[in-house]
Each structure stands twice: as C-alpha cells, then as structure tokens.
Image (tube, rainbow, N blue to C red):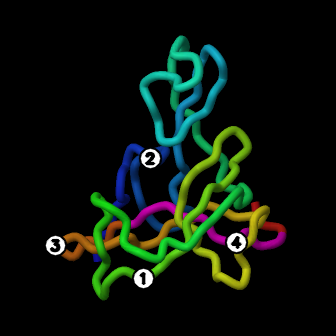
Amino acid sequence: MATRLIDESLFENGEYGDGDPPRLVGARCSGCATVVFPRQDSCPRCSEGTMTPRVLPVSGRVWSWTLQAFPPKSPYRVPAGGHRPYHVGYVDLGEVLVEARLAVPRAEIRIGLPVRLTTMPAYQDEDGTEVVTFAFRPERDGER
C-alpha cells in the first residue's frame, strides 16, 4: 500500500519511509528568536525578522491535553469506520508548543508525560493511499 504524509511542508524532508519518523520543521525569527510551528512567513511576535526553517526536537512533554470526542470541522476527513475519539494536546518541545495527536492510552496520559514524535494513519485517499500525520507517543526509558 502506498503511503504519504498529510502535508509535506510540516516535515524536514517532506518524505515518508521506513525507520524513524520524519522530523517536524517550524520556523525561527532572526529578530527575536521566536519559534513557530507550523512555518510562517512573518514573525507573530515582532514582525521584523526573517523566518528561517528550524528542525524541532523529537522529544518533549505533554503540556495540556483533551479528548477529541466529536469529528473536527473540515478539512478533517472521517476515517473508514467512522470517527473514533482520540487524545489531542499541546507538546512542549522547549522552544515551542506543538498541537498534536497523542498516541497515549487514557490510563497513561498526564500533564508532564515525556513523549516522542511518531506517525500514525490519518485517513485513506480514494485511491487507497494511506495518509499519515504526526503524533506523539510515550517515550520509553533510555530512548534518544
């Protein structure tokens, strides 16, 4: 089955393959050092500096979370079999908070939980291509 990323511009190389998940890429302002994700053309803080790509860390901590119990608004695509509730939250990557799906069982999820970047299926295109998105899963001891 063919697989593709949900949005290539969110990732370092815009490619998806076997092995480690692709790295997320935000942008950093040359004027005030603000880091944003996803990338933007202008700084939301100072509007003065040039925004340059910034590869983000793969590990962070859950800053806040909730259960997405109902289907989000468009452009969300309901997966085959219908919407199933999932966890979503903000992950603190040090320089920036990233909103993401959390691939964490309810019994384990908590604010401050160490998490690591992963990918997960989002939906399937009409041609059968599996579209994957980024998410964060619990980080295992000693993982780097």
Residue position for label 4: 138
| Three-letter code for the amino acid on which mark 2 is drawn | Leu
Tell me if 127 is positioned left or right of 137 in this view: left
Q: Residue at x 63, y 76 (%)?
A: 104
Q: Residue furthest bottom?
A: 81
Q: Residue at x 41, y 73 (%)?
A: 121
Which mark is on residue 130?
none
* Closer to viewer: mark 2 or mark 1: 1
Residue position for label 2: 10
The count of marks equals 4
Above/below status of 129 relative to 10: below
Is residue 110 found inside the magenta-colored segment of the image?
A: no
Residue position for label 1: 84
How far is mark 4 from mark 3, CA to CA?
Answer: 32 Å
Q: Which comes sooner in the sequence, label 3 or label 1?
A: 1
* Closer to viewer: mark 4 or mark 1: 1
The N terminus - image quarter: bottom left
Q: Residue at x 55, y 14 (%)?
A: 49
Query: What is the x, y in percent for residue 101?
Result: 53, 65
Secondary structure, mark 1, is loop
